Image (cartoon, grey):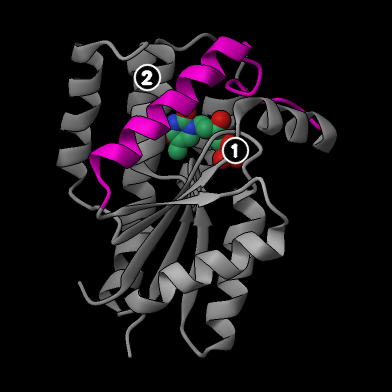
Protein backbone atom coordinates (compact mmCIF):
# COMPACT_ATOMS: atom_id res chain seq x y z
CA UNK A 1 0.00 0.00 0.00
CA UNK A 2 1.60 3.26 -1.09
CA UNK A 3 -0.40 5.89 0.86
CA UNK A 4 0.12 7.14 4.40
CA UNK A 5 -2.31 6.22 7.18
CA UNK A 6 -2.23 8.48 10.27
CA UNK A 7 -4.52 7.98 13.26
CA UNK A 8 -5.20 10.21 16.26
CA UNK A 9 -6.02 8.75 19.66
CA UNK A 10 -6.67 10.01 23.18
CA UNK A 11 -9.33 10.38 25.84
CA UNK A 12 -12.31 12.73 25.80
CA UNK A 13 -11.55 16.45 25.32
CA UNK A 14 -7.98 15.88 24.11
CA UNK A 15 -8.51 18.19 21.12
CA UNK A 16 -8.42 15.53 18.38
CA UNK A 17 -10.98 17.18 16.12
CA UNK A 18 -9.09 20.51 16.18
CA UNK A 19 -5.72 18.84 15.60
CA UNK A 20 -6.91 16.51 12.82
CA UNK A 21 -8.39 19.56 11.05
CA UNK A 22 -5.18 21.59 11.43
CA UNK A 23 -3.05 18.73 10.10
CA UNK A 24 -5.48 18.17 7.21
CA UNK A 25 -5.18 21.86 6.24
CA UNK A 26 -1.38 21.92 6.56
CA UNK A 27 -0.87 18.80 4.41
CA UNK A 28 -3.46 19.89 1.82
CA UNK A 29 -1.67 23.25 1.49
CA UNK A 30 1.57 21.34 0.87
CA UNK A 31 -0.17 19.78 -2.14
CA UNK A 32 -0.97 16.30 -0.83
CA UNK A 33 -4.29 14.58 -1.46
CA UNK A 34 -5.60 14.12 2.09
CA UNK A 35 -8.74 12.53 3.51
CA UNK A 36 -9.96 13.58 6.96
CA UNK A 37 -12.20 11.01 8.54
CA UNK A 38 -13.29 9.66 11.93
CA UNK A 39 -14.47 6.59 13.84
CA UNK A 40 -16.95 5.32 14.66
CA UNK A 41 -18.16 6.57 11.27
CA UNK A 42 -16.45 7.96 8.20
CA UNK A 43 -18.62 6.21 5.59
CA UNK A 44 -22.43 6.34 5.21
CA UNK A 45 -22.88 2.84 6.65
CA UNK A 46 -20.47 3.41 9.51
CA UNK A 47 -22.08 6.79 10.34
CA UNK A 48 -25.44 4.98 10.67
CA UNK A 49 -23.78 2.51 13.05
CA UNK A 50 -22.23 5.45 14.96
CA UNK A 51 -25.68 6.72 15.89
CA UNK A 52 -26.65 3.32 17.21
CA UNK A 53 -23.38 2.74 19.07
CA UNK A 54 -23.09 6.18 20.68
CA UNK A 55 -26.66 7.35 21.14
CA UNK A 56 -28.99 4.34 21.35
CA UNK A 57 -30.49 4.06 24.84
CA UNK A 58 -30.45 0.25 24.54
CA UNK A 59 -27.74 -1.44 26.61
CA UNK A 60 -25.11 -3.24 24.52
CA UNK A 61 -22.74 -5.80 26.03
CA UNK A 62 -19.03 -5.09 25.94
CA UNK A 63 -18.45 -7.75 23.25
CA UNK A 64 -21.36 -6.41 21.20
CA UNK A 65 -19.88 -2.91 21.41
CA UNK A 66 -16.48 -4.19 20.28
CA UNK A 67 -18.11 -6.01 17.34
CA UNK A 68 -20.24 -2.99 16.43
CA UNK A 69 -17.15 -0.75 16.34
CA UNK A 70 -15.40 -3.38 14.20
CA UNK A 71 -18.39 -3.65 11.84
CA UNK A 72 -18.37 0.12 11.37
CA UNK A 73 -14.59 -0.04 10.86
CA UNK A 74 -14.87 -2.77 8.21
CA UNK A 75 -17.24 -0.63 6.16
CA UNK A 76 -15.06 2.46 6.63
CA UNK A 77 -11.94 0.53 5.59
CA UNK A 78 -13.55 -1.10 2.57
CA UNK A 79 -15.27 1.98 1.20
CA UNK A 80 -12.98 4.88 2.16
CA UNK A 81 -9.61 4.12 3.79
CA UNK A 82 -8.23 1.20 1.74
CA UNK A 83 -9.17 2.67 -1.67
CA UNK A 84 -7.49 5.99 -0.73
CA UNK A 85 -4.32 4.26 0.50
CA UNK A 86 -4.22 2.15 -2.67
CA UNK A 87 -4.32 5.37 -4.70
CA UNK A 88 -1.28 6.58 -2.71
CA UNK A 89 -3.19 9.28 -0.78
CA UNK A 90 -2.96 10.35 2.88
CA UNK A 91 -5.69 9.35 5.33
CA UNK A 92 -6.05 11.09 8.71
CA UNK A 93 -8.46 9.25 10.97
CA UNK A 94 -9.80 10.52 14.31
CA UNK A 95 -9.71 7.27 16.39
CA UNK A 96 -9.14 3.71 15.14
CA UNK A 97 -8.24 0.29 16.60
CA UNK A 98 -6.49 1.61 19.73
CA UNK A 99 -9.79 3.17 20.85
CA UNK A 100 -11.50 -0.23 20.76
CA UNK A 101 -8.77 -1.87 22.82
CA UNK A 102 -8.84 1.00 25.30
CA UNK A 103 -12.59 1.80 25.59
CA UNK A 104 -14.03 -1.70 25.26
CA UNK A 105 -11.01 -3.66 26.55
CA UNK A 106 -9.53 -1.53 29.33
CA UNK A 107 -12.58 0.67 30.02
CA UNK A 108 -15.62 -1.58 29.88
CA UNK A 109 -13.90 -4.96 30.42
CA UNK A 110 -11.37 -3.53 32.92
CA UNK A 111 -8.43 -5.15 31.14
CA UNK A 112 -9.81 -8.70 31.36
CA UNK A 113 -7.38 -10.89 29.34
CA UNK A 114 -10.08 -12.80 27.42
CA UNK A 115 -11.71 -9.55 26.33
CA UNK A 116 -8.40 -8.05 25.22
CA UNK A 117 -7.66 -11.23 23.21
CA UNK A 118 -11.13 -11.08 21.62
CA UNK A 119 -10.51 -7.49 20.48
CA UNK A 120 -6.95 -8.22 19.30
CA UNK A 121 -8.22 -11.18 17.23
CA UNK A 122 -10.81 -9.00 15.50
CA UNK A 123 -8.14 -6.38 14.88
CA UNK A 124 -5.92 -9.03 13.26
CA UNK A 125 -8.79 -10.12 11.00
CA UNK A 126 -9.33 -6.58 9.69
CA UNK A 127 -5.63 -6.56 8.76
CA UNK A 128 -4.93 -2.85 8.47
CA UNK A 129 -2.69 -0.93 10.84
CA UNK A 130 -1.79 2.78 10.82
CA UNK A 131 1.69 3.88 9.75
CA UNK A 132 1.69 6.48 12.53
CA UNK A 133 -0.51 7.17 15.55
CA UNK A 134 -0.50 10.53 17.34
CA UNK A 135 -1.65 10.14 20.90
CA UNK A 136 -2.90 13.37 22.44
CA UNK A 137 -2.25 13.30 26.18
CA UNK A 138 -4.40 15.29 28.59
CA UNK A 139 -5.20 14.41 32.21
CA UNK A 140 -8.78 12.99 32.39
CA UNK A 141 -9.95 15.87 34.67
CA UNK A 142 -8.87 18.47 32.09
CA UNK A 143 -10.49 16.45 29.28
CA UNK A 144 -13.75 16.23 31.26
CA UNK A 145 -13.71 20.00 31.91
CA UNK A 146 -13.24 20.67 28.16
CA UNK A 147 -16.16 18.33 27.31
CA UNK A 148 -18.37 20.06 29.89
CA UNK A 149 -17.43 23.51 28.49
CA UNK A 150 -18.28 22.35 24.95
CA UNK A 151 -21.84 21.40 26.01
CA UNK A 152 -24.16 19.36 23.77
CA UNK A 153 -25.53 15.85 24.02
CA UNK A 154 -23.27 13.35 25.81
CA UNK A 155 -22.66 9.98 24.15
CA UNK A 156 -22.59 6.51 25.73
CA UNK A 157 -18.95 6.86 26.81
CA UNK A 158 -18.94 10.53 27.83
CA UNK A 159 -21.72 9.63 30.29
CA UNK A 160 -19.47 7.08 32.06
CA UNK A 161 -18.13 7.86 35.54
CA UNK A 162 -14.69 9.38 36.32
CA UNK A 163 -13.19 5.94 37.19
CA UNK A 164 -13.96 4.74 33.63
CA UNK A 165 -12.04 7.71 32.20
CA UNK A 166 -9.12 6.97 34.54
CA UNK A 167 -9.00 3.44 33.07
CA UNK A 168 -9.09 4.96 29.57
CA UNK A 169 -6.04 7.13 30.40
CA UNK A 170 -4.20 4.09 31.79
CA UNK A 171 -5.20 2.04 28.72
CA UNK A 172 -3.82 4.61 26.30
CA UNK A 173 -0.64 4.74 28.35
CA UNK A 174 -0.25 0.94 27.95
CA UNK A 175 -0.92 1.14 24.21
CA UNK A 176 1.77 3.83 23.79
CA UNK A 177 4.32 1.84 25.79
CA UNK A 178 3.61 -1.36 23.85
CA UNK A 179 4.06 0.22 20.41
CA UNK A 180 6.58 3.09 20.72
CA UNK A 181 7.60 2.77 17.06
CA UNK A 182 4.09 3.53 15.82
CA UNK A 183 2.58 5.62 18.64
CA UNK A 184 3.97 9.13 19.26
CA UNK A 185 2.72 10.99 22.31
CA UNK A 186 1.97 14.70 22.25
CA UNK A 187 1.35 16.90 25.30
CA UNK A 188 -2.12 18.25 24.47
CA UNK A 189 -2.51 20.44 27.57
CA UNK A 190 -0.89 23.28 25.60
CA UNK A 191 -2.42 25.85 23.23
CA UNK A 192 -3.74 24.32 19.95
CA UNK A 193 -1.14 26.03 17.71
CA UNK A 194 1.76 24.73 19.84
CA UNK A 195 0.34 21.21 19.70
CA UNK A 196 -0.15 21.52 15.92
CA UNK A 197 3.49 22.59 15.40
CA UNK A 198 4.70 19.52 17.30
CA UNK A 199 2.40 17.25 15.32
CA UNK A 200 3.59 18.59 11.98
CA UNK A 201 7.23 18.01 12.93
CA UNK A 202 6.43 14.40 13.91
CA UNK A 203 4.52 13.77 10.65
CA UNK A 204 7.02 15.42 8.27
CA UNK A 205 9.53 12.50 8.07
CA UNK A 206 6.68 10.14 7.07
CA UNK A 207 5.55 12.24 4.10
CA UNK A 208 6.19 10.86 0.63
CA UNK A 209 8.77 13.02 -1.17
P1 LIG B 1 -15.49 11.09 19.56
O1 LIG B 1 -16.38 11.82 18.64
O2 LIG B 1 -15.08 11.82 20.78
O3 LIG B 1 -14.33 10.44 18.89
O4 LIG B 1 -16.47 9.96 20.15
C1 LIG B 1 -16.41 8.66 19.85
C2 LIG B 1 -16.61 7.88 21.12
O5 LIG B 1 -16.59 6.48 20.81
C3 LIG B 1 -15.52 8.10 22.16
O6 LIG B 1 -16.11 8.15 23.43
C4 LIG B 1 -14.69 6.86 22.06
C5 LIG B 1 -15.67 5.81 21.62
N1 LIG B 1 -15.07 4.70 20.84
C6 LIG B 1 -15.05 3.43 21.40
O7 LIG B 1 -15.53 3.24 22.50
N2 LIG B 1 -14.51 2.41 20.66
C7 LIG B 1 -14.01 2.59 19.41
O8 LIG B 1 -13.54 1.63 18.78
C8 LIG B 1 -14.04 3.92 18.85
C9 LIG B 1 -13.52 4.16 17.47
C10 LIG B 1 -14.58 4.95 19.60
Name the residue located 25 percent from the left edge and 15 percent from the top edge: 115
Name the residue located 52 percent from the left edge and 8 percent from the top edge: 59
Whether the residues at callouts 1 and 2 have beta carbons within 8 Å, the answer is no
**Rendering coords of residue 170 (x, y %):** 43, 24
- What distance separates the C-alpha of mark 1 from that of mark 2? 18 Å
Q: Report if residue 202 is visible in the image.
A: yes
> Quick check: 64 left or right of 55?
left
Name the residue located 24 percent from the left edge and 21 percent from the top edge: 116
- Give the magenta range: 152-180
Q: Report if residue 100 is visible in the image.
A: no
Label 2: element kind: helix
Task: Between residue 141 and residue 19, name the one nearer to us.
Answer: 141
The residue that mark 2 highlights is 106
Placement of 91 over or under 122, stated as above or below: below
- Cβ of mark 2 under 8 Å from ligand 1: the answer is no
Q: Is residue 171 magenta?
A: yes
Q: Few, some or many C-alpha atoms within 10 Å of disc 1 (few <14, some 14-19, many ≥20)? A: many
Quadrant of image for the C terminus: bottom left
Placement of 41 over or under 132, stated as above or below: above
Rendering quarter of residue 77: bottom left
Mark sitting on residue 138: 1
Amino acid sequence: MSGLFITFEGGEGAGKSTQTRLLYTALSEMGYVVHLTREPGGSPGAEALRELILFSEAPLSQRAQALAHMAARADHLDSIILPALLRGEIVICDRFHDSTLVYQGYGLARGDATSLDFIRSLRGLLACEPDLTLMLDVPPELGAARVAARGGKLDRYEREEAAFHERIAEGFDKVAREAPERVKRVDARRAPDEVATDILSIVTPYLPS
